[in-house]
Amino acid sequence: MADISYDDEHRTWLIRLASTAYGLGLSGDGRVVRHLHWGPPCQPDDLAVLAAAGPAAHGTSRIGWGEEEPAEYVPWGGPRFDEPTLKADFADGTRGIEWRVTGHDIARDQTGATLTLDLADLAYPLRARLHYRAFDDSDVLERWASIRHAGGGGPIVLRQAHSANWWLPRRERWRLRYLTGGWASETRPAQAVLGPGKFTLESRRGVTSHHLQPYVALDDGTATEHSGEVWSALLAWSGSFRLVAETTPGGSVHVSGGWNEFDAPLELAPGDELSLPVFAGCYSGAGLGGLSRSWHAYELRHVLGDPARAGGSPSFPATSVPPGARAARLAGDGLPALRPVLYNSWEATGFDVTEEGQAELARLAAGLGVELFVVDDGWFAGRRDDHAGLGDWTPDPVKFPRGLGPLIDRVHELGMGFGLWIEPEMVNPDSDLYRAHPDWVLHFDRRSRSERRNQLVLNLARDDVAEWVHAVVDRLLSEHRIDFIKWDMNRHFSEPGWPDQAGRNPERVWTGYVRNLYAILDRLRAAHPDVAFEACEGGGGRIDLAMLARSEQAWISDNTDAWDRILIQEGFSQAYPAQAMMCWVTDSPNPLTGRRLPLRYRFHVAMSGALGLGGDLTRWSEAELTEARDLVARYKEIRPVVQHGHQHRLASTQDGPLGAVQYLSADGGRAVVFAWTGVRRFRPWPSRLRLAGLDPAARYRDEDSGEERSGASLMRLGLPLPDELDYASVLVRLRRTGISGQITASG
Ligand code: DGJ
């Protein structure tokens, strides 16, 4: 149960999360909200001791040098030289902030407790409100700020407005883990040792990006997958972002993060209020595995789909789906409904989409037990290849002479839901839309309009363009029985101009774009609560908490080579849950890498997330179709454990040619283990795989072999691994049968 309390005597606030705590206090002069604690549970008395010790308790060097008072929200102004969270210019030429704390409020709702702290500039009408939201069932603390021009005087220009600043406790050394990649190689785990200075992760691309996730996890160099203390933060923003981990001259470390201020000053007129994205933090004392289980639990309960929460930060929808409709999106236990097994035609047909071709694929997919059939790119007017058509969102009259209706009906008759791909933020110059509205794209009047994949970006920050995008998708959803939308976006911003706003802060395009995107999605989801959404940006280029709050799942990479994918999935799992991770089984050899892998292996990799199929089923043999049918049925049986269970990463392909992951149902009664091998060289195989998280005293039955072992034995001695050479895989299903008697060495 989350609880927030204020100690009036010592002027401290203690935020008790499910099993951890966060503490802050007011400086003696009432001007700084000082960070005191983030980590294991603590008591108000502990905070009083830390508060009494002053900033030195945090390990700061002499404040006289103007350094690193651990301010929760660091203003630029006065003698401090570290990364600010807020930098403002006033109309009279003053640059810099001086403020004091003017109030605070603690409130409770059905899901947890919130704390707000009010700050006011001493001389100017600049106000900041710091928000903290704790959930009863989570160790994730959501933080963000809202900034207000309280009226009077000219505009205030914000040169930097980060969401929050996380201070870490004093340690000898800090290691920072993050997720990096590129197209077809997203979310690969990486790490760096922090030295003096700054370590920056950012996107200047207008989207979250394939290159870097807005995610950090820090430890003192000793934490492992299974043990040790880890501090982590995730930004809920789908545009350009910047996270800065700074080691100050005094050796303190803090991480400031928010949307990227590069090229993006924001002007506040009197009365304007600006809410910033959530920058959530999570501490775990149980290693990286414990940390990601905390993130997953939070995301399943409070992020994925339609988080039921009041508005505030732009990160999460303020207009949530009506309660009745929201219930339909949930499984009985309050978690998001299980994701259906999906088929997507992209790798099978490319742009060669026709009514007959899709109907044939749908027939084959239904025969395998697929539950949702998705038509990808290529269905709309003029879309022969990627040179034309984006913007003209009506069915191609040659490919679909009768419109989409008959195919949709056919798919429904086959017992499947119908899904459609769309990329509504984009336009090909070769389209009726662009011919009619060449000024609708991001551009500078006298500069080139750089195309990527032969397309330009519509300026969604313009309300008329955003209205049009909304209307296009709304019409598609209103006129057709569509159950699922794959929302794609296949290029990043360049020439981010908005010529008709010259002199009127056109740089707000960076944030205005994302805000309007959220508004479009929120309206669509509220009006069409039965439609599920998949977040996609040329694979995993726009995955973050804010997109997940508007989606049921994400397409995490265009790389469907199962061996490559194991690492992409492992990285994704550091921050996000298996339920959101759409994984397709595609053809062999893989169209992207040329690698040949057994069908079972490809399934076993994809079955560790939300299963989809993406191969050309017309070319699969009878034997392959039969095997696929059995594996889809097997997936449906383990699906609740995979999609809602607790994940334990058992072996990483970063360390050698073995990857393995285990899911444990919330009641501990069922476990599902996947192990996959790559190509072995020289080293002998680890012959056994040790499981995690089981009850040592309970007995577990292998549902295939019938063999029973104790939890202690499965965790200490492990499961035997296959002897087969190269690209072998196993799926083991265990069910708890009772409490074990004597635990023997052999189990
Ligand atoms: C990029 C996506 O990631 C692919 O899955 C596919 O939808 C293509 N776009 C279609 O253009």
Image (spheres, rainbow, N blue to C red):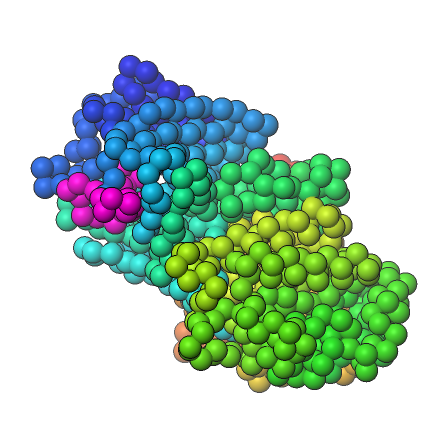
Residue closest to the eye, 657 or 76: 76
Q: Is residue 447 above or below residue 72?
A: below
Magenta segment, principal secondary structure? loop
Magenta-highlighted residues: 71-94
Q: Is residue 726 above or below residue 154?
A: below
**Does residue 682 appear left or right of residue 726 in this picture?**
left
Whether residue 50 is visible here, answered yes or no, is: no
Where does residue 58 sit, x and y in percent of width and height?
A: 21, 36
Where does residue 625 sit, x and y in percent of width and height?
A: 79, 74
Q: Residue at x 56, y 68 (%)?
A: 440
Residue closest to the eye, 606 or 719: 606
Where does residue 699 sit, x and y in percent of width and height?
A: 62, 43
Q: Residue at x 33, y 31 (%)?
A: 119
Q: Is residue 647 above or below residue 368?
A: above
Answer whether residue 620 is magenta in the image: no
Residue closest to the eye, 243 or 683: 243
Answer whether residue 81 is magenta in the image: yes
**Does residue 667 appear left or right of residue 61 in this picture?**
right
**Does residue 414 appear left or right of residue 540 in this picture?**
right
Where does residue 382 sit, x and y in percent of width and height?
A: 72, 81
